[in-house]
Image (tube, rainbow, N blue to C red):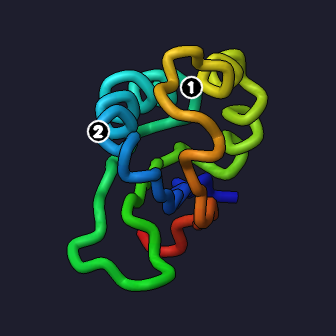
Amino acid sequence: MESKPVILLMGTDIVPEKEKEYNEWYDNIHLPMVLECPGMVRARRYHIVKPIEGFPKYLTIYEISNEASIEAIKNSAEMSAVREDPSRPFSDKDISVKWRVHYKQITP
């Protein structure tokens, strides 16, 4: 069986008063930490061009090497460090993860 890449799409919103700190932390601390996870290939962030009700402001697309890496990443020491990161400049009530979904590549 051929091993195909997987992408993880995450749509998030953050309270406006924490937005600057959130973006600085996400780009400079969070993404580099996540990219240390074995099987994580790359990550890119986007923000919505024209706000649409019900759609999150921020989108992060993570590329994962293959489907088997999903569980390996979740259980890795590197991801544990990401989840426990004390430098996070906001609380759980400040952020809203609208969706988190994996898609497996089907075309070459």
Q: Amino acid at mark 2?
A: Lys
Residue at 78%, 29% in the rendered image:
75
- The answer to whether residue 71 is above or below residue 56 is above
- The answer to whether residue 62 is above or below residue 105 is above
Task: Residue under label 1, please give it.
Answer: 37
Image-quadrant location for residue 61? bottom left
- Which disc number belongs to residue 82? none
Taking 8 as reference, is 19 left or right? left
Q: Position of residue 22 (x, y in %)?
A: 39, 37
Q: Residue furthest bottom?
A: 53
Question: Which quadrant of the rendered structure holds the N terminus?
Answer: bottom right
Residue at 41%, 32% in the rendered image:
31
Residue at 53%, 43% in the rendered image:
65
Taking 29 as reference, is 67 left or right? right
Q: Position of residue 12 (x, y in %)?
A: 49, 57
Q: Amino acid at mark 1?
A: Cys
Q: Residue furthest front?
A: 17
Give me the C-alpha separation between circle 1 and circle 2: 26 Å
Task: Residue under label 2, please give it.
Answer: 20
Question: Which quadrant of the rendered structure holds the C terminus?
Answer: bottom left
Q: Residues within 10 Å of mark 1 (few under 14, many from 20)?
A: many
Taking 24 as reference, is 73 left or right? right
Q: Position of residue 103 (x, y in %)?
A: 59, 66
Q: Could you tell me which secondary element the residue under label 1 belongs to?
A: loop
Image-quadrant location for residue 56? bottom left
Residue at 30%, 31% in the rendered image:
24
Q: Could you tell me which secondary element the residue under label 2 belongs to?
A: helix
